[in-house]
Image (spheres, rainbow, N blue to C red):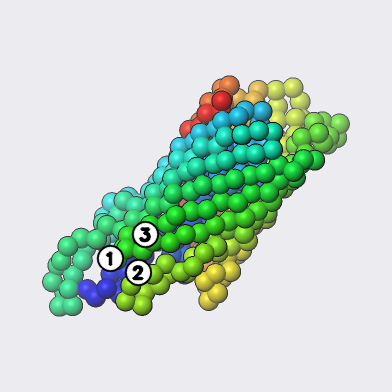
């Protein structure tokens, strides 16, 4: 099996779990949502209540806590032509330095599959175990009156049959209002917009390069205290992948959440995606003081898609 075929098959196996490679998006680790709460709400990232670094870093100013930490795992159904289970695992932490500043750090890993290798004559060779990881940093500045801006950066390491290293960054802005009323009920509004995964191509050598899946995302979330101990929330988010230019993708997702006594939540939503990337989403969560436990299941809508589940745990100090 020549180098080109190895790289192609490795991409299909490693990233086929989200169908990313089929549409030219060879680095799903940069675009997959590791947060179980928003995953259950149609992957509407503006509704983040944790895992801020990978969704909406400005949302940390919606809480009165100074430090937040999260861990999550997303496990995908079996990929055809590969052994093992593909997973995306994430760790993140955020800290408010002062009233207007917050910093973030995180780590993501995607892998778990094994590919059978062969030479040009079809004879078996060593197995290939592709994986990607990123080391991530972020900073948010709160201007006041609800407005904030943020930037994040990632060091990328990608191992297929060859290795590649690179970097990507994202920039965005957000607006939040915690003093709204809707039908005389207290309400909170969050709006978010960003450009993500900006950076140069990853070079695997031998003229094999991968373009980062650069995208524009816009979304919003609204929560309302409809009665004592009862809260409802809605979120909507869209993403437009404009790089690689020959494989553009539009995605739109939204969802609803009901929370009882600020403790137990149930969620449901839907995410539409071009090229069979759509999912029905559902999940539940539990919160007790600073502890957050969330789970989500994203059900594929066509046979060529991929279903996956995400579980997450977080704590706010």
- Tag 2–tag 1 contact (CB < 8 Å): yes
Q: Which mark is residue 161?
A: 1
Pointer 3 with pointer 1, Cβ within 8 A: no
Element class at badge 1: loop
Q: In this view, does 209 lie to the left or right of 153?
A: left
Pointers 3 and 2 in contact (CB under 8 A)? yes
Where disc 2 sits, the SS reads loop
Name the N-terminal-most of marks 2 and 1.
1
Query: Which residue does the image show at 44% across and 54% down from the upper left?
Result: 155
Quarter holding the C terminus?
Answer: top right
In this orientation, which residue lies closer to the viewer: 298 or 287?
287
Placement of 85 over or under 158, stated as above or below? above
In this picture, residue 193 sits left or right of residue 161:
right
Q: Which residue is denoted by mark 3 in the rendering?
A: 158
**CA separation in Å, label 3 and label 2:** 9 Å
- Residue furthest right in the image: 184
Front-most of residues 69 and 73:
69
Residue holding disc 2: 204
Who's the residue at 15% across and 78% down the image?
121
- Where, by quadrant of the figure, is residue 282 drawn? top right
Instruction: State the residue in front, 277 or 34.
Output: 34
Mark 3 or mark 2, earlier in chain: 3
Residue 250 as seen in the image, left or right of residue 21:
right
- 197 or 223, nearer to the observer: 197
Tell me the crowding category of disc 2: few under 14, some 14 to 19, or many 20 or more residues within 10 angstroms, Cα based.
Answer: some
Classed neighbour count for the residue bearing mark 1: other residues with Cα under 10 Å, few (<14), some (14–19), many (≥20):
many
């Amino acid at each position: 099996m020549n180098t080109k075929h190895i790289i192609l098959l490795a991409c299909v196996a490693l990233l086929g779990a989200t169908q990313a490679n089929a549409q030219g998006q060879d680095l799903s680790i940069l675009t997959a949502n590791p947060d179980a709460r928003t995953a259950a709400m149609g992957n509407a990232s503006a509704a983040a209540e944790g895992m801020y670094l990978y969704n909406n870093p400005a949302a940390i100013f919606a809480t009165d806590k100074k430090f937040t930490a999260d861990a999550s795992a997303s496990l995908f159904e079996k990929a055809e032509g590969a052994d093992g289970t593909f997973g995306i695992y994430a760790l993140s932490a955020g800290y408010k330095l002062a009233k207007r500043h917050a910093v973030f750090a995180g780590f993501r890993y995607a892998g778990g599959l094994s590919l059978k290798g062969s030479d040009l004559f079809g004879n078996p060779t060593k197995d290939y175990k592709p994986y990607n990881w990123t080391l991530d940093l972020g900073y948010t500045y709160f201007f006041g009156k609800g407005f904030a801006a943020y930037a994040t950066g990632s060091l990328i390491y990608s191992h297929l049959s060859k290795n590649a290293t690179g970097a990507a960054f994202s920039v965005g802005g957000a607006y939040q209002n915690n003093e709204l009323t809707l039908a005389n009920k207290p309400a909170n509004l969050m709006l978010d917009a960003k450009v993500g995964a900006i950076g140069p191509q990853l070079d695997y050598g031998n003229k094999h390069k991968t373009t980062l899946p650069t995208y524009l995302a816009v979304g919003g979330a609204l929560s309302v205290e409809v009665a004592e101990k009862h809260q409802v929330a809605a979120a909507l988010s869209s993403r437009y992948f404009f790089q690689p230019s020959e494989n553009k993708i539009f995605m739109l997702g939204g969802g609803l959440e009901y929370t009882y006594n600020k403790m137990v939540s149930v969620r449901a939503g839907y995410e539409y995606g071009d090229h069979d990337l759509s999912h029905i989403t559902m999940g539940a969560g539990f919160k007790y003081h600073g502890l957050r436990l969330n789970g989500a299941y994203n059900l594929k809508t066509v046979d060529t898609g991929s279903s996956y589940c995400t579980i997450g745990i977080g704590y706010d100090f």
